[in-house]
Image: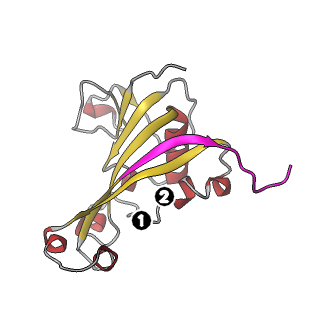
Amino acid sequence: MQSSGLTLNLGSGKDYKPDCVNADIRADVGADWVVDIGAPMQIDRQFAKIMAFDVLEHIPNLVQAMTNCRDLLEMGGEMHIHVPYDLSHGAWQDPTHVRAFNEKSWVYYCEWAWYLGWKGSKFEMTHLEMRLSAYGQHLELPQNEILRLPRAVDSMYVILKKVPYEDTSVAA
């Protein structure tokens, strides 16, 4: 199947990108597609790439949102994610945040997809980047120690790739 080449800018808000399909839950921000990604939906199109920058922390039903994103991606497509790190200032300063993230937040969407009942496809993490705060940048410690220090890491940038998946953990 040929790639659509389309990019979904999920949670576009005020960051409208003319080269993307801009999607947001709010109708008043000029999005191309008004959608609640955290609600069950019928998938009628697919994308080569989804950008979810500073949006997942606002979604109450993250499992449904990630299921929808997986289904919206073409096989081999990538989801680029930017989220606040759980020990950062930014994780909880915004009253509309319902969660924060750490390096283990992606396990169920990748290695443990069976737990979510996913069939046919799952995510594979291809990139994980911790973005340090100014404080964290000045620490002369190993990264595994820096990750445990409050306010040392601001956010994470993650790339998840949609890959084929067959659950072999349950006998037929």
Answer above or below: position of 53 versus 84.
above
Left or right of 78 on screen, residue 1: right
Q: Position of residue 113 (x, y in %)?
A: 62, 53
Secondary structure beneath dot 2 equals: loop
Q: Looking at the picture, tell me which residue is in the foreground, 157 or 8.
A: 157
Residue at 23% of width from left, 80% of height from top?
Answer: 141
In the image, residue 159 lies in the stretch drawn in magenta: yes
Pointer 2 and pointer 1: residues touching (CB < 8 Å)? yes
- The magenta segment is 158-172
The residue that mark 1 highlights is 103
In the displayed structure, 142 sits above or below 108; it is below
Q: Which amino acid type is marked by label 1?
A: Glu
* Amino acid at dot 2: Trp
In the image, is 63 to the left or to the right of 136? right
Q: Quadrant of the N terminus?
A: top right
Q: CA distance from mark 2 to mark 1?
A: 7 Å
From the image, tell me which residue sits under label 2: 106
